[in-house]
Image: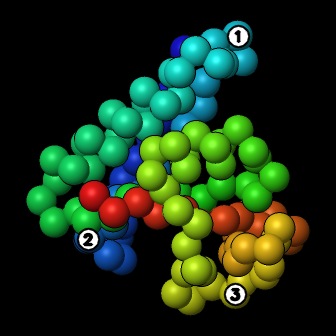
Amino acid sequence: MGYVFGMRSQNNPEEGWIRQIAVLKKYEGRGIAKTLQKLCIEAFKSMRGVRYVGLSVEPGNKPALCLYKSLGFKIAEGELGFETVTVNGKLAIKDYYGPGEHRFIMKKEL
């Protein structure tokens, strides 16, 4: 039905990152993505020293933004070492996945 892929940051052991999440189209709208996110967050909570969870999201992906906000994620003020651009009045990482592929970075404190 779906999956979530998370990993501890290689640069900052206090951060876990949700790198991918997907749910098959025919199963969307059933709360599966939210459940997968919660399971991943709980896994990070169980890791000694992890204090934050981060993820990136396409600025126009309103369903994902709503989901992440409902789980307590907030749009970060940028990310160290990355150029930013303003999208919809908020800072996004410029060209995160290539030219024109800007992403919001969202973080949640554990």
The tag on residue 83 is 3
**2 vs 1, front mark:** 1
Q: Quadrant of the C terminus?
A: bottom left
Q: Secondary structure at mark 2?
A: loop
Q: Is residue 69 left or right of residue 35?
A: right
Instruction: Name the amino acid type tagged 1.
Output: Lys
Q: CA distance from mark 2 to mark 1?
A: 36 Å
- Which x, y percent locates residue 22? 60, 31
Amino acid carrying mark 2 in the image: Pro
Whether pointer 3 and pointer 2 mark residues with C-beta atoms closer than 8 Å, the reply is: no
**In front of the other: 52 or 16:** 52
Q: Residue at x 77, y 67 (%)?
A: 102
Q: Are marks 2 and 1 in contact (CB under 8 Å)?
A: no
In the depicted structure, whether residue 2 falls above or below residue 99: above
> What residue is shown with label 1?
26
* In the displayed structure image, the side of residue 35 where residue 55 appears, left or right: right
| Residue corresponding to mark 2 | 13
Q: In which quarter of the view is residue 23 placed?
A: top right
Q: Residue furthest right?
A: 100
Left or right: residue 51 compared with residue 35: left
Mark pair 1, 3: CA separation: 37 Å
